[in-house]
Amino acid sequence: MLKVQIDSFGYGDETILENISFKVKQGVHLALMGESGSGKSTLLKIIYGLLHVENGSIFWEGKQALGPNYNLVPGEPYMKYLSQDFDLMPFISVAENIGQYLSVFEQDTHQQRIEELLQLIELEAYANTKVKNLSGGQQQRVALARVLAQEPEVLLLDEPFGHIDNFKRNSLRKKLFPYLSKKGITVLTASHDPNDVLPFAERTLILEKGRIVADKKTKALYKTPPNYYIASLFGEVNILPIRLLKTYSEIEKSILIYPHEFMVSKTSGLKVTVQNSFFKGSHYLNEGRTEDGPILYFNTPKKFDLGDAIFLNVSLKTINKRLQG
Ligand SMILES: Nc1ncnc2c1ncn2[C@@H]1O[C@H](COP(=O)(O)OP(=O)(O)OP(=O)(O)O)[C@@H](O)[C@H]1O
C-alpha cells in the first residue's frame, strides 16, 4: 500500500499542493488527471523523493520514504520515476542505457532482460544505436525501458507517451499497461490523454489547483462526472439545460452530456441548426446552435451541411443517471 499525505507544498511562497491524501493498493494503476499546472508532476516528484515536504509523509508498505533531505541520491530503491525529461546517456547505445539500470547481481540474465525490454518498447532494431541518434519519441521509449529494468514495485509515469506519435503510442500502451499489471507493479500515471486512462487505470484522481477534487473508479468518474471540469478532461462535453428537452421543461437544472450520447432525429426533439461538421475519422463531431442560443456538440456517422436543422434527444436513462450522479 502506498500512502500519500501532503498537508501543503509550495516551491516558494505560493502553495502548489494542499490537503493531498490518498492510498493506493499494491498492483493498482491510478491515473492522475488535471489541467496543466494543477500539480501532477509536483505530486509525482514528491512521492519519488525529489522534492522535500515539510508537512506530510509518503509510506510504502508501512515504511516511510525519507525524501531528498535524507537520501543522498534521490529516490527509493523500490520506486522508479519516468520524468518528462528523459535523463539518458546520449553517447552510449540503447542496450547499454538499459543495461546500466540492471542489477549487477544478475549479470547472467542481463542480455535476456535487455531483449525483453527492447521488445516491449519496440526498439529491437535500435539496440546498438547511440541514444543521441534517436528521435524524441524513441528516446522516451528507452527511458521507459530504463525505469523498468530493475522491476520497480512502484512506478511513477509522467506523461509517458508525450513525445511518441499516435501510431506507436497506441501499440505501446496496449503492451505496457497489461505488462505492468501482470507484474503486479503499482502504477501512478499523470496524463492528459484519456486514452491512457480510460482503458488502463482502474482508478483516477483529479487535481484542480493543487487539490484533489475527485478520486474514484475511472469508469464511474467518466459515466457520472461530478462537474464540467472533470468531464472535460475526458474530452468534449456539453452543459445541457434540462428545460431545453421538452419532457423535462419544469426542471431548472443542467446536466453534462457527451457528444456521443445525443441521438439524432429528423422529426422531434431539441432543434439545433448545424454550424459546423468536423470529420473525426470514425464519426463527425457537429456543432449545433439551439434556438435558445447555447451551442451543443454531438456525434453523427454522416456529415451535415451548414444550416441543416436537426433534432437531438437524450435517453431517459442517461438523463436520470446524470441527474442523480
Ligand atoms: N521548479 C519549480 N519552481 C517554481 N514553480 C514551479 C516549479 N515546477 C512547477 N512549478 C509550478 O507549480 C505548478 C504545478 O506545476 P506541475 O508541473 O506540477 O503541474 P502539472 O499538472 O504537472 O502540469 P503539466 O500537465 O503542464 O505538466 C505550476 O504553476 C508551475 O508553474
Image (cartoon, helix red, strand yellow):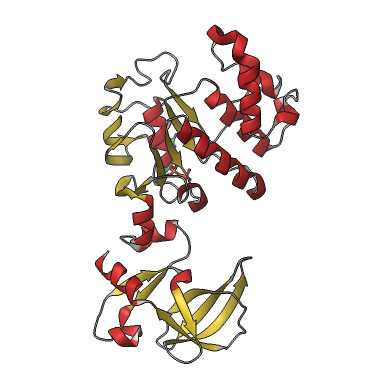
Task: Please state which of residues 73 and 242 is positioned toward the viewer in this rendering.
Answer: 242
Residue 118 seen anywhere in this rendered image of the structure: yes
Q: Is residue 313 left or right of residue 159?
A: left
Going by the picture, which residue comes out furthest to the front? 182
View quadrant of ligand 1: top left
Going by the picture, which residue comes out furthest to the bottom? 267
- The answer to whether 317 is drawn above or below residue 61 in the figure is below
Quarter of the image for residue 88 reads top right
Task: Please state which of residues 290 and 182 is positioned toward the viewer in this rendering.
Answer: 182
Quarter of the image for residue 155 reads top left
- On the image, the x and y values in percent for residue 277 come to 60, 76
- Which residue lies at the image location 28% right of the left edge and 31% below the top edge? 3
- Which residue lies at the image location 24% right of the left edge and 81% below the top edge? 251
Q: Is residue 118 left or right of residue 146?
A: right
Count of labels shown? 0
- Which residue lies at the image location 30% right of the left edge and 86% below the top edge? 247
- The answer to whether 118 is drawn above or below residue 73 in the figure is below
- On the image, the x and y values in percent for residue 325 come to 27, 64
Q: Is residue 104 left or right of residue 20?
A: right
Quarter of the image for residue 111 reads top right
- On the image, the x and y values in percent for residue 319 come to 32, 73
Task: Please state which of residues 27 and 252 is positioned toward the viewer in this rendering.
Answer: 27
Give the quarter of the figure containing the N terminus: top left
Residue 98 seen anywhere in this rendered image of the structure: no
- On the image, the x and y values in percent for residue 323 come to 27, 70
